[in-house]
Image (cartoon, rainbow, N blue to C red):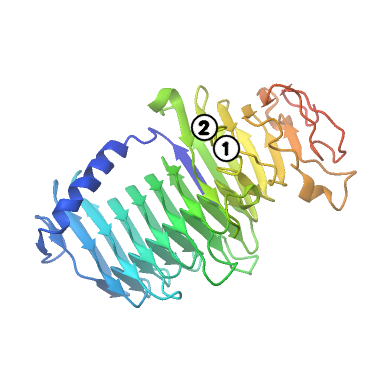
Amino acid sequence: MRIIFLRKEYLSLLPSMIASLFSANGVAAAIDLCQGYDIKASCHASRQSLSGITQDWSVADGQWLVFSDMTNNASGGAVFLQQGAEFSLLPENETGMTLFANNTVTGEYNNGGAIFAKENSTLNLTDVIFSGNVAGGYGGAIYSSGTNDTGAVDLRVTNAMFRNNIANDGKGGAIYTINNDVYLSDVIFDNNQAYTSTSYSDGDGGAIDVTDNNSDSKHPSGYTIINNTAFTNNTAEGYGGAIYTNSATAPYLIDISVDDSYSQNGGVLVDENNSAAGYGDGPSTAAGGFMYLGLSEVTFDIADGKTLVIGNTENDGAVDSIAGTGLITKTGSGDLVLNADNNDFTGEMQIENGEVTLGRSNSLMNVGDTHCQDDPQDCYGLTIGSIDQYQNQAELNVGSTQQTFVHALTGFSEWHFKYRCWWQRYC
């Protein structure tokens, strides 16, 4: 599975999307039932159920297509897709909007509060708001499952907001996707929640849960692309306050990027106030407040002059933490700031280019621990610099002093590392 985050013109859509959300509240109660799929005047749609067919909606400028207040004791509160069905919601030009609000599916085994798609059915959604949708099981707003077949993207969402959606007894407060190819661009995830009442295997991914359970190592794991996306105030009762990802065989590849064109907030992007409880009573560092990486790899690619900040040092260190056993790689000559307590990330970290700053001086004490348990004399947890990119400068800033890392470089507990390296593996 490949997950890519491209941070370009970060939150440029936020004011218009919030304004649209408020205006939608008045629209939904006063409009007529839709007649057909070419929407020229705001209307309220009935529940859609598709099996192996294509349905394309078009919304004229300034108009609303509304799916709201539907309750079902079956998966898919507003839309149900199966057997390779294709469903699209697009603006006719630029300002046509679609709203999914307050749709609910009851029962812990029913998924997709607003939309349920299975058997390689595809979704293409642009200019959409999902607000207050609830699933009894997985995917508070959207549930999508496939078979990792090669070809078109299974779930595509562009210019959207997911706010106040809930997976009551499952994973993915806003989106749960399994064995799929996914593309998300210019999306805001705010205050989504994943809960569990019966099992310690649920409640993961406050905003999104991207999973691959295919046990065939020869089968492709698919990819997920996330572009211009913000995560704030999302919570998980289990793991991964904003993002949870895991795989049965091949690791997920996650690429979180800030590119040259980003100009908002002085070039500084902030993801904050995401938390996970790990089935406890409060935020847990081990649960990954921002992200939990199972069999996963994440690359932070930050452009020159840009900064990505995850977390706030004024918060509890468990909020916005990164946990798991995978691989973190920093590329690009820009800055990455990690302000949470990330001691429960025990995988490997490679800084190939640019600067990484740890806002809490002991926030990566256990990096490399997982990989050094079996052979502590021949392993490493931290690499600063890249022999393949010797022209780049890699730098690690740790609080106000040098920091001792357990298994940081070679597996020995008393190694110290320097702040600056160019191409050396061991500094």
Q: Residues within 10 Å of mark 2 (few under 14, many from 20)?
A: many
> Label 2 is placed on what type of residue?
Leu
User: Which corner quadrant of the image does residue 389 belong to?
Assistant: top right
The N terminus is located in which quarter? bottom right
Q: Would you name the residue on which mark 1 appears? A: 300
The C terminus is located in which quarter? top right
Q: Is residue 237 above or below residue 385?
A: below
Residue at 60%, 33% in the rendered image: 331
Q: Residues within 10 Å of mark 1 (few under 14, many from 20)?
A: many
Q: Residue pushed farthest front?
A: 281
Q: Is residue 84 above or below residue 162?
A: below
Local SS, label 2: strand
> Label 1 is placed on what type of residue?
Phe
Q: Is residue 16 above or below residue 50?
A: above
Local SS, label 1: strand
Residue at 55%, 43% in the rendered image: 255
Q: Calculate the distance from the C-alpha at mark 1 to the C-alpha at mark 2.
A: 9 Å
Percent across and percent down for residue 41 are 9, 55
